[in-house]
Image (cartoon, rainbow, N blue to C red):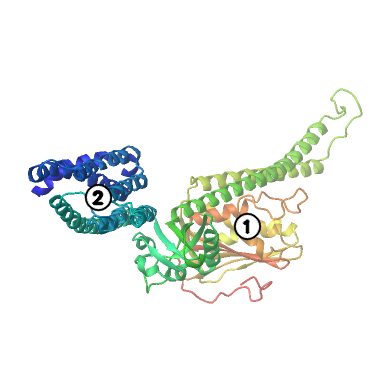
Amino acid sequence: MRVTRYFLPFSRVVQAMVHPCARRDPLQAALHATFIATRLIAVAVAAISLPVYLAVWGAPDALAAICFAWLAAPMAVAFYLSRTGRLWVAHVMSAASMALLILVLATWTGGMASPFLPWLAAVPAEAALSGSGMIVLLSIAVSGGALIGMTAAEAVGAIPAATADPGATSALGLIGVLPILAFVGLMTGRAWSLARRAAAVERAGHDRLRRIANAASDAILTLRRNGNVTFATDAAEAIFSVPGAALCGDGLFARVHVADRPGYLTTLDVAAAGGAASTELRIDAAPSGVAADYVWVEMRCRPLVVGEGGSPDIVAVISRIGSRKQAEGELRLAQEEAERANLAKGRFLASMSHELRTPLNAILGFSDILRTGADEGRGTDGVSGPAIPVLDDEKRREYASLIHESGVHLLEVVNDILDMSKIDSGHFEIFPESLDVVELVETCRRMVADQVAQAGLRIETDLPHSVSKISADPRASKQIVLNLLTNAVKFSRRGGRIVVGAYREDRSVVLYVADEGVGIARCDVPRLGEPFCQLDSGYERRHQGTGLGLSVVKGLVALHGGTMEIDSELGVGTRILIRLPEIAATATVADRPGVTEMPYKLIA
């Protein structure tokens, strides 16, 4: 700890001299700092060695002076690197200066036999600390060139005899042999330290990336083109309910819904080809050994690296989109509901334009005839013109009856609209009381008897003794049965039969109305009961009505906690069943006597 404290100021100086371009990368910063530190240490060694040399050997000769001068040269190289950040240039400069010094020392101390010549091996060894192959090759070239130059000079006799005195030469020889061993050991240790630091930096980077990836809520995976997973972050467990390791291999592919697997593989192919791709999949998110539980996820893919043989890896980010899919579903339903509402509005306008205009025209027309017919002997303008004969009593009664029927029709239309509006807004109140089912059916049958007779139909009742009373609103119940009977009369053929009845079923009472009319195609049955729904809704339709009758019935039945069921066949007839909860029934379930021969198969 104390040693570290002593070297801390020096370390701060070295770190401050590192060029800004190298500070962003921890490994590069360490390489620059190492280069600068060794040069500063060389200068410090020169400064410390000079007084020692002077004390032992006295004034330095020319060779010693060259050595001490060279020890100060690395300071210039260190400042060059600090100012430019060009590590490879600094290494080449340092290698050249060291090789030049070794050549001078070798020339001075015996040429090829000089103890300083082995220092040429230290030039590429020191360059190896750069971590760059190019710098090492350049340093080897510099050392090799120096060695070749020394060999050639000695061969031609250009190397002078050693001129240093024996004592100084011995000291220089000792200085030449021992430091090279120390230097090589230092370089080896430094190389090991840099390798260890590089590994630590790499591990720290990997750990940092893993922590960042694991902190993300989305699962990050690497995959092969065939869909096999090679890596998955911890976040995968939150999505797939299994550890990320369980997805490796074909673990993810096995969890993709069968219908989505082609899209899954296609997305990987697009990403492997070098482009970004995304898709939505259903993934089994249930733990192992549990029944499948598919959830919607989005997978976004990009190419990562190209492995051996040109097979690319793919990085995929998978996130759950259940809430988004739910929102999309709700939006789609809202759009469909809006479209249905728009269609209902169109049907309403088309229906009302017919249902209101027709009876109003009849009322205005026949009332005008009655009004003008009363002006005996007056013209159509009340002043002049041909006289209009007085209407007899029979005509007056006929026209008054038509006006009354048209007014009743208008009242029914208005009542249906008001009732439907109250039901939809939740303001329609019912007041249940004990109600006799047989009396209800008979009352409604009598109320439509005239319509049945005019249409050339016959009506029958199917009322077993097991049906007695229910708890229901009398007015609403009567409206339910009357609407069903009116519809049956409207859509029945002349000479046909209508059956109205009731029977018990578990804890409910079923009211039904069956006819032998035109019937409805089974594919159109689900549309019945929607407001203003008329399967024959054009201006040339054969049957009158707003299309609200069954909607009102359905709403009133729902207010009682019951259900409506429609069974129909085109050209055969229709049966509508109303199930109402039975509360006050007194008899047990029994066979239903009554109608022994049904009009057609739809009548139960």
Identify the residue under disc 2: 108
- Label 1's element? helix
Q: Marks 2 and 1, Cα distance to the nearest angstrom? A: 112 Å
Q: Quadrant of residue 510?
A: bottom right
- Marker count (numbered): 2
- Label 2's element? helix
Q: Where is 576 relative to 559, above or below?
A: below
In the drawing, what numbered circle is on residue 527? 1
- Give me the residue at 10% from left, 45% from top: 57
Neighbours of disc 1 within 10 Å: few (<14), some (14-19), many (20+): few
Q: In screen coordinates, is 153 left or right of 417?
A: left
- Foreground of the two, 584 or 559: 559
Q: Amino acid at mark 2?
A: Trp
Q: Residue furthest right?
A: 386
- Foreground of the two, 447 or 304: 304
- Give me the residue at 26% from left, 53% from top: 106
Tell me where residue 83 appears, x and y as whole percent: 32, 37
Q: In screen coordinates, is 298 left or right of 358?
A: left
Tell me where residue 340 appears, x and y as whole percent: 61, 49
Q: In screen coordinates, is 70 left or right of 440?
A: left
Q: Amino acid at mark 1?
A: Arg
Residue 493, visible in the rendered structure: yes
Q: Quadrant of residue 177?
A: bottom left
Tell me where residue 298 appears, x and y as whole percent: 47, 57
Neighbours of disc 2 within 10 Å: few (<14), some (14-19), many (20+): many
- Give me the residue at 63% from left, 57% from top: 527
Q: Where is 331 relative to 569, above or below?
A: above
